[in-house]
Amino acid sequence: DKAVLEKMCELVVEMGAKNAKMVNVSGAFHTPYMAAASEALGKTLDEAEIQMPSILVYSNVTGKPYTSVDEIRSLLKRQLLEPVKWEQGTKDLIAGGHAQYVEPGPGKQLKAMMRRIDQDAWNKVRSRRRNAARAACAPLFRSAIPRLLDSRDLPRRALVDRPSRLKSRRDAPN
């Protein structure tokens, strides 16, 4: 309820918070409100062939690298329902001695968050140009997602060709 959230923003400021504001989001991601979507994702993950990655891949749920295929499956199911542990994962990377960080998207949000975590790491963040990031993702959007949607009972819209353009499922390539 919007009125409840607005009142909560007022109360936390009265209690001493610097600021509280309403944020426009496209979904209740990383909250219990995503339970139905998590169940559907869980069914898909249970059927999917998953292999251990050849590089370290960090879980948003734990902020630590995945250690097994079973853990990947389990934590991806939880990811829709639980807060993202991005700061913990970033601190783990820093503690591990990683020397360079790349922001693949067009903005600078990850770099801004990095600044709050570690000034030295912030100085090592390199941003990719917008078109380079889009080009790197294009094969995924053209092939993997439409095929997944054709084979599963998932939402009827898919990102195709470019992340910025939505097409209906019937327009997706086979």
Image (cartoon, rainbow, N blue to C red):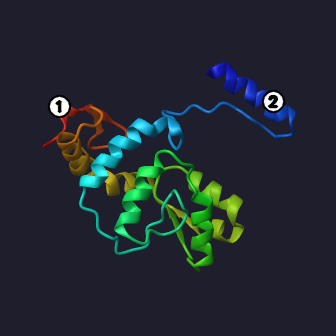
Q: Is residue 103 above or below residue 4?
A: below
Q: Secondary structure at mark 2?
A: helix
Residue sitting at 59 percent across and 80 percent down?
97
Residue sitting at 33 percent across and 36 percent down?
165
Dot 1 surroundings within 10 Å: few (below 14), some, or many (20 or more)? Answer: few
| Location of mark 2 (residue) | 11
The outermost residue toward the bottom is 97
Q: Secondary structure at mark 1?
A: helix
Q: Is residue 2 above or below residue 130?
A: above
Q: CA distance from mark 2 to mark 1?
A: 48 Å
Which of the marked residues, 2 or 1, is nearer the chain's N terminus? 2
Residue sitting at 54 percent across and 61 percent down?
62
Q: Horizontal placement of 34 versus 143: left or right?
A: right
Residue 128, image x and y in percent? 47, 59
Q: Horizontal placement of 89 versus 67: left or right?
A: right
> Which amino acid type is shown beneath numbered disc 2?
Leu
